[in-house]
Amino acid sequence: MSGLLRIRWAIAPEIAPRPLITCNRCGGLRPYRSSGKFRVNANGKRIDAWLIYRCVDCDNSWNFAIFERRNRRDIEPALLAALEGNDPALARRHAFDAAVLRSHVGRIEEFPDVAVERHVLERRPEHATVLDLRLTLEMPVPLRLDRLLAGELGVSRSRLQAWEERRRLFVELDGAKALRRPPRDGMAIRIDLSDEPDRDTIVAAAGA
Ligand SMILES: [Zn+2]
């Protein structure tokens, strides 16, 4: 008679961060976006690899260094092949690495848009009253946990806060401050909805 519904949410950012670069063609600060293409340059035994970005307004290019002047011997052949073949997964991984991008250019634009794939982990109980959400993230997202939950469950952030204060919402490991921080890979959230008149709607939103 357990009313526990276990659901995994696989969360992925949808829009890569954009570095803000002084564009010498536009003559001012402009966002640049990844072209998804690498440029690999060999100078004797030394190899440079960049991910090419383009100004959103004028298409001017900017090279984001993946590595520079690295000895060919120190580069795995599979990595070199992926760079030379513009491997989309590799380009995506670098384009979404906000921390490295920020350390290169100082200022970046970030976007909170995420895609959430829902997987019900066990057979759905007839009357679910408790949600057990397991989050998996392939990379960090610039979005607070309460905004994510509010958007995906269709409830207000103040209601989430009230649940948290009444111990109806519990974030495993991270405790009370977790709602105001970005979600993390492996995070588990339990929400007891047994007193909520609209729980069926919330449960449906969680697992739909
Ligand atoms: Zn430009």
Image (cartoon, rainbow, N blue to C red):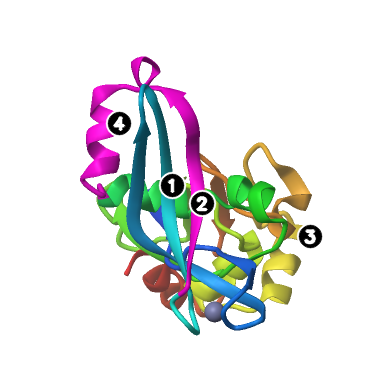
Badge 2 is on which residue?
Answer: 64
Q: Which residue is mark 4?
A: 79
Mark 4 packing: few (<14 Cα in 10 Å), some, or many (20+)? few
Label pair 2/3, CB-CB below 8 angstroms: no
> How far across and down, in percent of the image, does residue 123 sit?
25, 50
Is residue 129 toward the left or the right of residue 92 in the image? Answer: right
Determine contact: label 4, label 3, CB under 8 Å: no
Check the image and name the residue furthest to the front.
44
Amino acid type shown at disc 1: Trp
Q: Quadrant of ligand 1?
A: bottom right
Image quarter in which the C terminus is found = bottom left
The magenta segment is: 60-87
Determine the CA span between mark 2 and mark 3: 45 Å
* Element marked by disc 1: strand
Q: Residue at x 58, y 74 (%)?
A: 31
Q: Earlier in the sequence, mark 1 or mark 4?
A: 1
Image depth: mark 1 or mark 4 in front: 1
Q: Residue at x 50, y 84 (%)?
A: 57
**SS state under label 3:** helix
Say if disc 4 is inside 8 Å of ligand 1: no
Name the kind of residue labelled 4 in the image: Leu
Q: Amino acid at mark 2?
A: Phe
> Of callouts 4 and 2, which one flags the residue occurring earlier in the amino acid sequence?
2
For disc 2, the neighbor class at 10 Å (few under 14, some 14 to 19, many from 20) is: many
Q: Nearer the viewer, mark 2 or mark 3?
A: 2
- x and y, in percent, of residue 143 in the image: 61, 63
Q: Classify mark 3: residues with Cα within 10 Å, few (<14), some (14-19) or many (20+).
A: few
- For marks 2 and 3, the one nearer the N-term is 2
- Tell me which label, 1 or 3, sits earlier in the chain: 1
Residue at the disc numbered 3:
165
User: At 40% across and 66% down in the image, what residue appears?
Assistant: 115
